[in-house]
Amino acid sequence: MDTPTATVNGTDRPLAGTPAYTSALTWLRALGLTGAKEGCNEGECGACSVLLARPAPTGDLAGDGADLAGGGAGTEWTAVNACLLPAAALAGQEVVTAEGLGTSRDLHPVQRELAHRGGSQCGYCTPGFVCSMAAEYYRPGRTANGTADPEHGPNGFDLHALSGNLCRCTGYRPIRDAAFALAAQAPADDPLAVRRAGPAPRPSPGRNDAEGAAFVRPATLADALAVLAEHPAAVVVAGSTDWGVEVNLRAARAPLTVAVDRLPELRGFAVDADRIELGAALTLTEVERALDGRVPLLAAAFPLFASRLIRNAATLGGNLATASPIGDTPPALLALDATVLLAAADGEREVPLAEFFTGYRQTVRRPDELIRAVRIPLPLAPLTGFHKIAKRRFDDISSVAVGFALDVADGVVRRARIGLGGVAATPVRALRTEEALTGRPWTEGTVRAAAEVMAAEGTPMDDHRASAAYRSAMLGQALLKLWARTDEAQLDLGGRA
């Protein structure tokens, strides 16, 4: 990066000399763009939300493949938390802040509706709401359907777009009213709507050195692996939704940070007769869209994984590589019998996810390896469920998370896979519960007996989120809830499998 720059509200801004630990939020505010605020500094409040120009995916997202590597011709405005994103990662990219959407004399439609309907009081969180709402306003495929429910407006506005934005004083009803009052489509002459027809800029590969540390964005997977082979202590970041918290709240610093989020080799998506392969650097939003409900267990887990702001940045590979015992995707992927593909300069290996975690925040991945993809075998179990216990429904860390995948045929459990999070030092399989179910009739008696076994799985502990006794109780209740919510159609499907 000889002269790294980022385009901010239409103006090129230099990034040279920006330390790797500097967040996009800090950098933007230093430019005088103080609309974005520091609230929690860990991606939970959305006061720092900004828009990024990301490549719009092309191809049949619900089919057997799609161009998710960034080669699409169009642009999608994507809302992200600026407090977690390294400023150096913006090199070559295009950013729009609340200031770039409108002015006091020429309000953007989102700003106008918020003002008109009383959606702002102290105003601290308002710019963040504005950016998240604008991303949904410009979302491709948002169309009016004339009907509304508690989470969707008649204009097609999905309130989940605001699940990562917290209001501290106004209340959410006027904000919701403003969202539902927006036009179904942006005017044809809207500059940001017009901008969607052009290609999104690609992040600039290169190196940015400052204060004795470096931020490196390799151009290819081979380049990234070469860097890791030479510098095994380097910190690898994709969405930076975990590392960003460490930097902000614990003052973590790394001599070398390697960004892999836009590597084409890590952004594949394919469906074959016997498996689904998901690139490790795909964001969770991209995975959700690409699967389009094809994997019901993941479809149930995605809405409970933090917020849309986080899912727009967080990656599947990053969620696994951090090896957090309370990550949301591992329980679901364990139940799906997923495997991870680990790439190194000397080749690639495939590891069952059940063997991937070795200890608290530890995995079998070597320092010179990257997770290239996650594979899910087909066919899928017909009876699945995902249960997460947390203090807030959205954007919260789980006390307990459980993924279920059961094959039930002719009223008998032929095969059971259950993944658990929050009850041990690593995500684990509920092996004893699986054994208690397999080969037995799918009846209330079997389920209640297995629920007692499940309540004793893992090694739950007392902490500020929940007691060990509560976690154990929730494990057993999760299986009972699955039984209570079993759809007869699922059992019929199991009988035909």
Image (cartoon, rainbow, N blue to C red):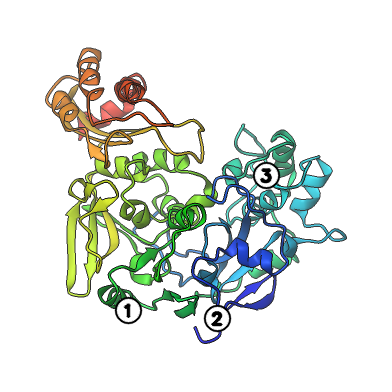
Q: In which quarter of the image is residue 401?
A: top left
Q: Name the residue under label 3.
A: 155
Q: Quadrant of residue 186?
A: bottom right
Q: Are marks 1 and 3 in contact (CB under 8 Å)?
A: no
Return the residue nearer the eye: 67 or 216.
216
Residue found at x 61% / y 38%: 152
Percent x, y for residue 235? Answer: 36, 65
Secondary structure of residue under mark 2 = loop
The C terminus appears in which quarter of the rendering?
A: top left
Q: Between marks 2 and 3, how big is the CA–CA gap?
A: 40 Å
Task: Judge whether 38 appears above or below 303 on screen.
Answer: below
**20 left or right of 330 in image:** right
Q: Are marks 2 and 3 in contact (CB under 8 Å)?
A: no
Task: Judge whether 436 appears above or below 165 on screen.
Answer: above
Return the residue nearer the eye: 105 or 183.
105
Disc 2 marks a residue whose amino acid type is Pro
Task: Judge whether 15 appears above or below 481 on screen.
Answer: below
Secondary structure of residue under mark 3 = loop
Disc 1 marks a residue whose amino acid type is Asp
Percent x, y for residue 102? Answer: 78, 61
Q: Which of marks 2 and 3 is nearer the N terminus?
A: 2
Residue 462's label in the rendered image is none
Q: Earlier in the sequence, mark 1 or mark 3?
A: 3
Residue found at x 24% / y 56%: 340
Q: Mark 1 points at which residue?
A: 223
**Extreme residue toward the bottom, this view:** 2
Q: Name the residue under label 2.
A: 4
Q: Between marks 1 and 3, how big is the CA–CA gap?
A: 45 Å
